[in-house]
Image: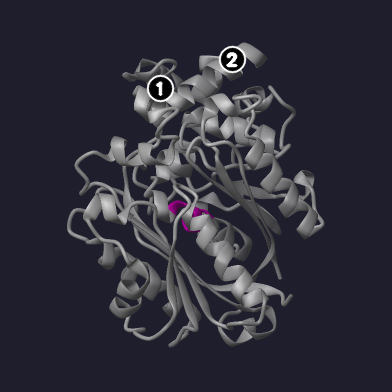
Amino acid sequence: MRDVAIVGVGMTPFGELWESSLRDLFVDAASLALRDAGADHLDAIYVGNMAGGQLVGQEHLGPLMADQLGMRGVPSTRVESACASGGAALRAAFFEVASGASDLVLASGVEKMNDGADVTGVLATAADQEAEVYHGITFPGLYAMIARAHMAAHGTTLEDLAAVSVKNHRHGALNPKAQFKQEVTAEQVMASSMVADPLRLLHCSPVSDGAAAVLLCPLDRAAEFCDKPVKIRASGMATSAMALADRHDPAFLDAVHLAGNRAFDMGKVGPRDIDVAEVHDCFAIAELCVLEALCFTERGLAGEATRAGETTLGGRIPINTSGGLKSKGHPVGATGVAQVIEIVEQLRGEAGARQVKDAVVGLTQNMGGSGASAVVHIFERV
């Protein structure tokens, strides 16, 4: 396979973007990525999107977005893997370039969530309909059960969960494109309204609109488009049981562990080689479980590591320097690509106040549902 580089990035702000449509958001992000690379054509487009049909009544996004971008005729495909749709779109684009089938491929993600009447119900379609949704469970409920299982197994505390939210809001306050740019205290987190015991409002990521896009090309052509290409060193993906009850250990994200191992093996690196990572903190407990599944900490010790400052800017392994899903926002189809943009900016040395000193190798982890699908990518400054 050919080596692949990211040579252009573009992202809209995340938030309640009432004046922009689904197609507007995509075109804005894609145009920024093309402009960043100085590119004027594409060989293929991948659009990560979970629920365009349910939220805004629009399916068949591939040809629609190619046309709206002024790229009519270019092969364009929508990719869906629930909240991991953006990461899966990047993986598809990566392998298309690596295989030699195409040279300039856009990997993008977009979601318009605030226009939907029943966002909670739409998101629940990523859970097992017969085993879970039929009985009234929602994603806050599923992650609350994960939190309770983690507490029972490892002694995880409410303070541990709060530390994730506090840290990510501190990072997000430095991100001009974040939905929530204000810091919060542990006291504010633990006093916020209950959503699903033990998860409170400030443990949960918001409902967001937004889009993100990155441009890929062969590494040996990267100098044509930018001075600071970032190599995609590895891609790993895995799945698990949809229903939480069907997993051996609900407190351990086995698909994340497997996807991570596949990426580490492909990239010939390990957890200790990662300088900065963006992980899927749809709920505070998710970040702790991901850190353990990727072996950034031992099982049961992610909360302690977070409270000790190991995962903050300046710590041993800075996590979610963008603010994560919690502070930056979570337009589900766009999230996986937005994570990549944060890592690209970190490895280019362009993250401003969020910059991790001497960052060379970065990682993104994006997952769908309660962890039934997971995508991990590893990146390297060249």
**Which of the pair 190/22 is nearer the observer?**
22
Question: Callout 1: few (<14), some (14-19), or many (20+) C-alpha neighbours within 10 Å?
Answer: many
Estimate the x, y position of residue 137 in percent, counting from the top left.
38, 25
State the CA–CA distance, disc 2 to disc 1: 18 Å
Quadrant where the N terminus lies?
bottom right
Residue occupying image coordinates x 49% and y 48%? 322
Image disc number at residue 189 = 1
Q: Is residue 25 left or right of residue 128?
A: left
Residue 217 vertical placement versus 137 (above, below)? below
Kind of residue at disc 1: Val
Nearer-N-terminus badge (2/1): 2
Q: Is residue 100 left or right of residue 32?
A: right
Q: Is residue 153 left or right of residue 167?
A: right
What is the image's colouring?
A: one colour
Estimate the x, y position of residue 167 in percent, counting from the top left.
51, 33
Question: Callout 2: few (<14), some (14-19), or many (20+) C-alpha neighbours within 10 Å?
Answer: some
Estimate the x, y position of residue 23 in percent, counting from the top left.
27, 67
Residue occupying image coordinates x 36% and y 22%? 135
Answer whether residue 359 is visible to the viewer in this image. no
Which range is magenta?
335-339
Kind of residue at disc 2: Met
